[in-house]
Image (cartoon, grey):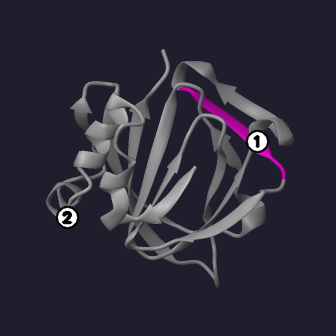
Amino acid sequence: MIYAKLKDAPAYRGIHPNLDLALERITPEFLAGVGAERVEIKGGDVYATRFTYETLPAEETFFESHRKYLDIHMMAEGSEGVEIAPPEALAEFDRAEDGDFYAYRGEGDYKLVLSPGDFLVVFPGDAHRIKMQLDGPRTVSKVVFKVKIYD
């Protein structure tokens, strides 16, 4: 997991070439052009999508993880609570292997607030629970990059 300020994104280059492609696009100009339709950077290996939704009470949310992709979450508007835990510490209740999606219930090890100006990178092995309310329901908008790092 990486939790940092957007201005510090270039410091994390060199971990994986596909991650570098995504980090290079963390600019106001690129992010402003990302909408609800997927924007492909390198075919299905690196792409970005904007999501807008209402935050939910923690008990209505769940953890997800991936085995081939990492996610980069960047809040554009609003703030949400996020929890991180290793998948092996959680109870799996759903999966879609062809979509690289695994769902879990349980308790998080790390809690943070994702706000404009922040970014969060969750690697395979970082189950993440997003969309959590901080002080009641709020509409949030964020850009999520999907970055393939394993075949």
Q: Position of residue 52 (x, y in %)?
A: 41, 62
User: Which amino acid is tagged 2?
Assistant: Pro
Prevalent SS, magenta region: strand
Q: Residue at x 78, y 57 (%)?
A: 109
> Marks 2 and 1: CB-CB under 8 Å?
no
Mark 2: few/some/many CA within 10 Å (<14, 14-19, 20+): few
User: Disc 1 marks which residue?
Assistant: 104
Reply yes or no: does residue 104 show up in magenta: yes
The part of the image, by quadrant, that contains residue 112 is: bottom right
Mark 1: few/some/many CA within 10 Å (<14, 14-19, 20+): many
Q: Earlier in the sequence, mark 2 or mark 1?
A: 2
Judged by depth in the image, the label closer to the viewer, 2 or 1, is 2
Horizontal relation, residue 52 to residue 100: left or right: left
- Viewer-side residue, 24 vs 96: 24
Residue 29, numbered label: none
Residue furthest left as drawn: 29
Q: Position of residue 25 (x, y in %)?
A: 23, 49
Give the magenta-colored segment's residue range. Answer: 100-106
User: Which amino acid is tagged 1?
Assistant: Tyr
The part of the image, by quadrant, that contains residue 131 is: bottom right
The part of the image, by quadrant, that contains residue 14 is: top left
Q: Position of residue 105 (x, y in %)?
A: 81, 47
Q: What element does badge 1 sit on?
A: strand
Check the image and report above or below for 66 versus 35: above
User: Disc 2 marks which residue?
Assistant: 28
Q: Let me know if residue 119 appears in the view.
A: yes
